[in-house]
């Protein structure tokens, strides 16, 4: 028989999943904790025992989802292949999971400090992976030592973020490759 601790962990996971689904369906403002509790089959008090507020609940749910989306940097030995793996993974995560719709809903709520912090964490995690890839490429002399890596990361992530947050369109399979190849054309050009 499962322990109380295991049941609590399972309930917390179900609460997170329901929260993500409801934010993706309705947006942040229309999410009601009563609806989360009803979807999970628990009480609103059970939510508050785990999460002190609606923003804290959503932030925790987003963190749990993002933790699976921000994998370790690939180490193929090829800048192109590493970047395609990272961007392709980011694009798939934004398109095939609740992460894309949830981020769209939360960007509008940036004034809430808890939600702004979780958005910054998600962006920071993806940026750290890309920075690691670019620094390894710099060490292999695939890109110049004086490259502005923050700008490079902005350029690489730009297509994914604009398509998800602004245009709300999907990603065709070749997009990661095309973004990387376009960036590489400029990044590896002789000055």
Image: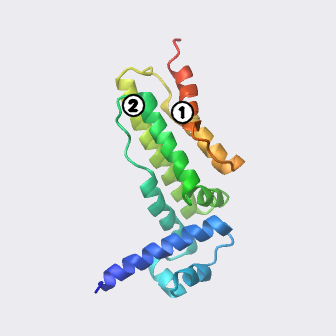
Q: Earlier in the sequence, mark 2 or mark 1?
A: 2
Residue 125, above or below 105: above
- Quadrant (top left, top right, bottom left, bottom right) of the N terminus: bottom left
The residue carrying pointer 1 sits among few (fewer than 14), some (14 to 19) or many (20 or more) residues within 10 Å by Cα, namely some
> Badge 2, how many Cα within 10 Å: few under 14, some, many 20+?
some
Is label 1 in a helix, a strand or a loop? helix
Question: Residue 30, how many percent across, how many down?
Answer: 69, 72
Expressed as whole percent of the image width and height from the top left, the position of residue 44 reads: 54, 85
* Residue at image point 55% right, 35% down: 156
Task: Confirm whether residue 150 shows in the render.
Answer: yes
Q: Which of 176 and 50 is in front in this view?
A: 176
Quadrant in the rendering for residue 4: bottom left
Give the mark toward the camera: 2 or 1. Answer: 1
* Among the 4 quarters of the image, the one containing residue 143: top left
Please report the residue visible at 56 percent of the width from the left and 40 percent of the height from the top.
Answer: 157
Residue 50 sits above or below residue 105 on the image: below
The residue depicted at 61 percent of the width and 71 percent of the height is: 22
Residue 115 location (% of width, % of height):
57, 62
Residue position marked by numbered label 1 in the rendering:
177
Give the residue at mark 2: 135
Q: Is residue 28 visible?
A: no
């Amino acid at each position: 028989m499962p322990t109380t601790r295991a049941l609590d962990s399972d309930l917390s996971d179900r609460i997170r999943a329901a929260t993500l689904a409801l934010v993706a369906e309705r947006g942040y403002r229309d999410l009601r904790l009563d609806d989360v509790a009803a979807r999970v089959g628990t009480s609103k008090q059970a939510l508050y025992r785990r999460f002190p507020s609606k923003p804290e609940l959503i932030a925790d749910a987003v963190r749990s989802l993002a933790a699976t989306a921000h994998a370790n940097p690939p180490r193929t030995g090829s800048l192109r292949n590493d970047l395609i793996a990272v961007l392709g993974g980011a694009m798939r995560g934004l398109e095939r999971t609740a992460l894309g719709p949830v981020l769209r809903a939360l960007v509008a709520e940036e004034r809430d400090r808890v939600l702004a912090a979780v958005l910054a964490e998600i962006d920071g995690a993806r940026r750290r992976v890309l920075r690691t890839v670019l620094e390894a490429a710099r060490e292999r002399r695939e890109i110049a030592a004086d490259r502005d890596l923050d700008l490079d990361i902005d350029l690489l992530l730009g297509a994914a973020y604009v398509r998800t947050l602004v245009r709300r369109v999907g990603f065709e399979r070749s997009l990661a490759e095309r973004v990387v190849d376009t960036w590489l054309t400029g990044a590896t050009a002789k000055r």
